Image (spheres, rainbow, N blue to C red):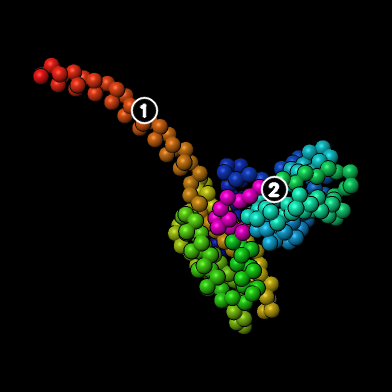
Amino acid sequence: MGKKINPRIFRLGLSEQWRSRWFARDDYAKFLQEDIEIRNYIKKELAEAGIDKVIIERKRGEVVINIKAAKPGLIIGRGGSGIEELKKKIVNKYLDKKTKININITEVTNPNLSASVLVQVIREDIEKRMPFRRVMKQNIEKVMKAKGQGVKIILAGRLNGVEIARQETLSKGKIPLSTLRANIDYSRGAADTIYGKIGIKVWVYKGEYFDKKIEEKKKEKAIFKTAKLFSQEQPKKVAIKKEGK
């Protein structure tokens, strides 16, 4: 049997951070259940907005929810009315009325490189009965056009309504799962069809975390050296030519 692990959990504490940030002793189970229910509710309620991450932070009597979405305008609404309605629904369903809630919404810069957004797009297309291979190829091309270095998509279930369930995999580029410095985004979900549920898994490789810093340092050093060479050598050459004349 193969031993598999979630690539995001594998990098926790190094390149990835926790999605729930708080500390508790007696109320640990209660807070954990609330976080799971709130996260699932936001993903279902605001599925059209293309949610990438839901990060929950807790302080004394206060809950801060940070949402990253591809279409933040659908969540905010006119004059922030959408956020106020969302706050009321979360408080009434999952939290005490005394707790304060703050919701911060940020936009995803490149949604085609977000694994969770891709899972939502694939789920909607499969539920519309589109051919699964076409859906997989289209999303792979989107990622590669967005300068992604690698993609892998797996669909499992009764694909196209076939009686025998099977698994189909399509990939392009490279996905170094065992490299800790690799920036790999992973997400999974399921599409509800007439024939049953179809599982979806997506891996997106965006590159290494330390590439940009190393390149910037190299450029700075190269510019500094060339400036020194020109400042020292050019005046000497000009002086020699004048003396020869």
User: Which of 71 and 29 lies nearest the eye of the viewer?
Assistant: 71
Look at the image and give the residue range highlighted in magenta.
105-117
Residue visible at 73% across and 52% down?
76
Q: How far apart are marks 1 and 2 (CA)?
A: 41 Å
Residue visible at 63% across and 50% down?
107
List x then y, in percent, for residue 175. 48, 56
List x then y, in percent, for residue 116. 62, 58
Q: Does the magenta stretch include residue 108?
A: yes
- Neighbours of disc 2 within 10 Å: few (<14), some (14-19), many (20+): some
User: Which of 177 and 202 lies nearest the eye of the viewer?
Assistant: 202
- Neighbours of disc 1 within 10 Å: few (<14), some (14-19), many (20+): few
Q: Kindly identify which residue carries mark 1.
A: 224
List x then y, in percent, for residue 77. 74, 54
Secondary structure type for disc 1: helix
Does 117 sit above or below residue 243? Answer: below
Q: Residue 117 carries which label?
A: none
Residue type at mark 1: give it.
Answer: Phe
Residue found at the very far left of the displayed protein: 245
For the N terminus, the image quarter is bottom right
Residue type at mark 2: give it.
Answer: Ile
Q: Does the magenta stretch include residue 54?
A: no
Query: Could you say which quadrant of the image residue 111 lies in?
Result: bottom right
Could you tell me if residue 94 is visible in this image?
no
Q: Kindly identify which residue carries mark 2.
A: 105
Residue found at the very far top of the displayed protein: 243
